[in-house]
Image (spheres, rainbow, N blue to C red):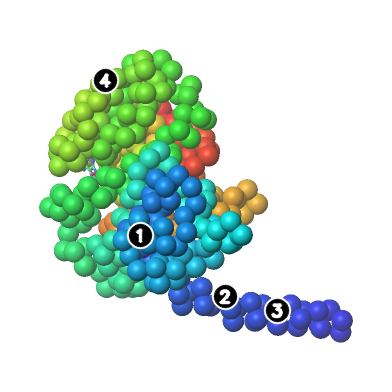
Amino acid sequence: MEDKQRELGGEEKEEEHAKLEIWKYVFGFVEIAVVKCAIQLGIADAIESHGSPMTLLELSSALRCDPSPLYRIMRVLVHLKIFKEKPATQLGPKVYAQTPLSKWLLKSGKNSMAALILLESSPVMLAPWHGLSARIQGVNNSAFEAVHGEDVWSYAAANPNHSKLINEAMACDARVAVPAVLESCLEVFKGLETIVDVGGGDGTTLRLLVEACPWIRGINFDLPHVVSVAQECDRIENVGGDMFDCVPKADAAIIMWVLHDWGDDECIRILKKCREAVPEDKGQVIIVEAVIEEDNEKQDKKLTNVRLMLDMVMMAHTNTGKERTMKEWGYVLGEAGFSRHTITPIHAVQSVIQAFP
Ligand SMILES: C[S@@+](CC[C@H](N)C(=O)[O-])C[C@H]1O[C@@H](n2cnc3c(N)ncnc32)[C@H](O)[C@@H]1O
């Protein structure tokens, strides 16, 4: 009887919790919209270049906007703990200060995620989300193609501004992921003279790698429209081509956040081309990708959340892409002819998977 009552108490609490929790989903998009607005206005940049916390009037004058709507945006951003508010004192009015989180909204710098947020919240990338249920029901094979008439890479080739946004967004992640790769796996790069980055985007990954490993020369390999605008850099050669046809030869290949854009069949084809590009005896393919953890006990809940969201992004933005479990990685690597592989977790959304011919 007592157990029954305790259970009912628990159920009531859950009902109460649900009654509030549902609002998170009613207005979930608002948080993204407000953060996007903060980036577009340049709020974090203004406080950073001011060099100290700013009053509302200082901020509105720096951003050339009306203090009244700015106050309302700042109230939400402070509530979300993105910026900090320091209360008024006898010495002066209330001021807005930067936090570690708001610094990720700076438009440039080592730890900026601004371009990635602007990409994901761009009209081009948001539109396919409206077709997610149709994609799952099989009404169409691709939510992105249903809206834009072609896949994301062809769309980018035809729209240089969107391509630039993709390259800058990927560079944001590379600036976070590459230091994490080097921190946990520096050994992997010792003894390599050359490395090819397959789908290397604007070359940020290789620039960071050769900076940390000055003994390495790199080949940044991507579609012609991407490498044609990649930065020139010492010890890095930009090569345009199609990874489904051929991958330039090197001691090792690195491939980061590319395989998750593709289904198993395409992944196996790409991996076979990477395997052909490295020496049979001592070559390796270094894959930097998320691994979905299935064991609830071992899971880091916050990272698993990011990885599962990323899987949904693949569903909305690519035709066949997906995030993979350890077993699913084992399958594609085996089918591509690799004899063995290791998986090393790093301090990032991705892990390092070393595959040996
Ligand atoms: C998600 S981005 C990853 C970029 C980069 N590796 C990074 O993590 O910053 C995927 C990359 O694959 C490239 N890509 C797509 N199809 C390709 C192909 N057929 N051959 C070579 N690169 C391709 C895209 O142009 C894009 O730069």
Q: Secondary structure at mark 2?
A: helix
Nearer to me, 52 or 177 = 52
Q: Quick one: quadrant of the C terminus?
A: top left
Label 4 neighbourhood size at 10 Å, few (<14), some (14-19), many (20+)? some
Q: Are marks 3 and 4 in contact (CB under 8 Å)?
A: no
The kind of residue on which mark 4 rests is Arg
Q: Are marks 4 and 1 in contact (CB under 8 Å)?
A: no
Q: Secondary structure at mark 1?
A: helix
Q: To which residue does mark 4 refer? A: 235
Q: Earlier in the sequence, mark 1 or mark 3?
A: 3
Residue 25's spot in the image, x, y percent? 48, 74
User: Which residue is drawn at the image coordinates 53% and 39% (left, top)?
Assistant: 347
User: Which residue is drawn at the image coordinates 35% and 48% (left, top)?
Assistant: 107
- Ligand 1 contact, mark 2 (Cβ < 8 Å): no
Q: CA distance from mark 1 to mark 3?
A: 47 Å
> Residue 269, which numbered label?
none
Residue 36's spot in the image, x, y percent? 36, 61
Q: Is residue 117 above or below residue 236?
A: below
Q: To which residue does mark 3 refer? A: 13
Nearer to me, 356 or 317 = 317
> Residue 21, which numbered label?
2
- Ligand 1 contact, mark 3 (Cβ < 8 Å): no
> Residue 61, which numbered label?
1
Label 1 neighbourhood size at 10 Å, few (<14), some (14-19), many (20+)? few
Q: CA distance from mark 2 to mark 4?
A: 53 Å
Q: Earlier in the sequence, mark 3 or mark 4?
A: 3
